Amino acid sequence: MNYTPEQIAEIVLKVLKDENEHDILLFSYDEKRELAKNPNTSTEILNVLATNENPGVRWEVVNNPNTPTETLKVLATDKSSNVRWWLAQNSSTPVEILKVLATDENLCVRYWALDNPNTPAETLKVLATDEDLSVPWWVAQNPSTPEILKVLITDKNRDVGWVVANNPNTPAETLKVLATNENFGVRYGVAKNLSTLTETLKVLGTDEDPSVRWSVARNPNTPQETLKFLVTDKNRDIRRAAANNPKTPQETLLSCFY
């Protein structure tokens, strides 16, 4: 059921006028959800709604900016994984709660906690060696893990090179190492990464794999010297990509047609 702003205001005013827990419990499911999501709802009422039997109501409590940290701590152990999942991906969730969710028994909850930019580096460092090999992949995607990425690429049992190569926060020196990876998909990621050094792009501009050279041709940081070379590549798509790169000198393009 979709409420009008006037109806929502009426529900909130009704509760604010007489904060009676028994009255709140008598509300319909839709009324409880609207009350739980309203930013004007008091912390006392949110605490009551946080114990509601319906996970949809508790889910709304998680997203309310007025919900106390202590209540969120309780919801971090909620029996519904959907409630914990939403708490894990919320950018307002306190760090101490994200630490708990990062070790949740439910894999999806852990994934979202690992993907949250507010999850502390020390927590991510521990989970980078998680026994579930898919977890390090999520650690590698977190924008707050530049130092941890250096460690991840040296672990032969956790092939996360492709993910690390595509992370915009991967250190340039780490990308330089990945540029020599035997997997062309990893080199492709390095070639398109805007953090890749020009010297590394020069090397990848002569890569044997056409998809890697194509990615170099499209990178706005590719030096003109490399673009001059790629504009004459035997692959038509690579030539076109190099020609469309704004850094390619105009005289180079003219020489190709005349």
Image: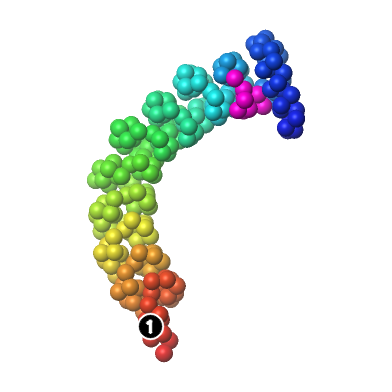
Residue 38 on image: x %, y % = 63, 27
| Residue at position x 26%, y 64% in the image | 199
Residue, far bottom: 258
Label 1: few (<14), some or many (≥20) within 10 Å? few
Let me know if residue 41 is in the magenta part: yes
Q: Is residue 151 left or right of residue 188?
A: left
Q: Nearer the viewer, residue 131 or 152?
A: 152
Let me know if residue 45 is in the magenta part: no
Residue 48 on image: x %, y % = 59, 15
Residue kind at label 1, given as amino acid type: Glu
The quarter of the rendered structure image containing the C terminus is: bottom left
Residue 35 on image: x %, y % = 65, 24
In the image, the segment drawn in magenta is 33-42
The quarter of the rendered structure image containing the N terminus is: top right
| Residue at position x 38%, y 71% in the image | 247
| Residue at position x 38%, y 44% in the image | 143
Residue 189 on image: x %, y % = 36, 56
Instruction: Give the number of marks.
Output: 1
Q: Is residue 137 left or right of residue 78?
A: left
Report which residue position mark 1 lands on: 251
Circle 1 SS class: helix
Can you say whether 166 is above or below 120 in the image? below
Where on the picture, by quarter, is residue 36?
Answer: top right
Residue 98 visible in rendering: yes
